[in-house]
Image: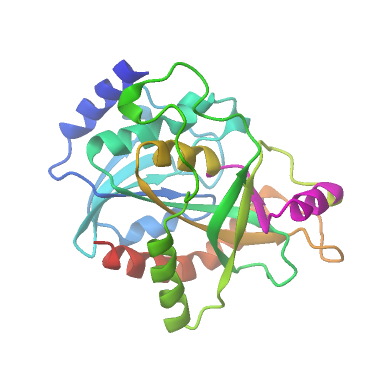
Amino acid sequence: MLKAINHTTSFFNKRIKEKPRVGIILGTGLGDFSNNISDQVKIPYTKIPNFPRTTVKGHEGQMIFGKIHQKNVMAMQGRFHYYEGNSMEKIIFPIRIMKFLGVETLIITNASGGMNPAFNVGDVMIIKDHIHLMPNPLIGIHEPVFGERFPDMSEPYDKELIEKAERIVVDENIPLREGIYIGVTGPTLETPAEYEYFKRIGADAVGMSTTPEVIAARQMKVKCFGISVITDLGVPGKIEKVTHEDVQNAANKAEPVLTRILTKLIKEID
């Protein structure tokens, strides 16, 4: 894996002028956030050596380099999921690349099902902690260059970034939603009993991504900020039949709110 990471890092270094300091992962239906990036350099995943392919609607499949508020950023317009048949090593491969390119802060977004009765479809939830119910992405041969064998996870999401986002949400008159995200394999959406189980063990929202990337980022001492768009509800009495298209549409509608929060947050990153 290390040989492939060095190869791909070298590929990017030959094509970008400035090292990115902020990495962004855009989840289902949230790809239009990339329109806020200036001085763009776009590279399709199909052109990137050693990169997996994204197979999910709503994931464009390209890496974008540029600036937001004069901060150098790189954004994944589409991510890789375990349910697509990817190994955990492949899922976290882009996170390793980000770190090797110079990224110090990772902003990660997703579409998720809300289980907190206070949530509504279209809300955005600041992730304060998570529960990881997929295989751990650090299982396997340990490479010291990535960090510790047993990385501390007492602060998976950076408290300072959360506090900044809380202030932005209040200033923008956006309903403040916060909670715990649970990452599961998918690709099936949840049964009512599964929603109830996840809620009972402490989760407020459920999705099929994010937690592997955050674990890899924290091993490498990259600060993380996570935010979920609530695209459907797993609340008793509010559970309805949902399609992937419904999830995409709900995420698309919430994208302007997400953009307001994230662009201001990036502006405040030191």
Q: Nearer the viewer, residue 158 or 12?
A: 158
Question: Above or below — where is 167 with respect to 253?
Answer: below
Q: Nearer the viewer, residue 40 or 233?
A: 233
Q: Position of residue 235 (x, y in %)?
A: 79, 62
Picture quarter with the N terminus: top left
- Which residue does the image show at 28% across and 58% down from the upper left? 37
Q: Quadrant of residue 268?
A: bottom left
Q: Nearer the viewer, residue 155 or 177?
A: 155
Q: Position of residue 89 (x, y in %)?
A: 47, 25
Q: Residue 203 in magenta?
A: yes
For the record, the magenta segment spans: 193-210
- Which residue does the image show at 68% across and 38% down from the upper left? 186
Q: Position of residue 197 (x, y in %)?
A: 80, 49
Q: Residue furthest left?
A: 17
Question: Above or below — where is 223 with respect to 235?
Answer: above
The way the protein has been coloured in the rendering is: rainbow
Q: Residue 103 in magenta?
A: no
Picture quarter with the C terminus: bottom left
- Which residue does the image show at 49% across and 83% down from the upper left? 173
Report whether 47 appears left or right of 182. Answer: left
Q: Quadrant of residue 81?
A: top right
Q: Position of residue 251 (x, y in %)?
A: 57, 60
- Residue 254 seen from this side: yes
- Residue 53 seen from this side: no
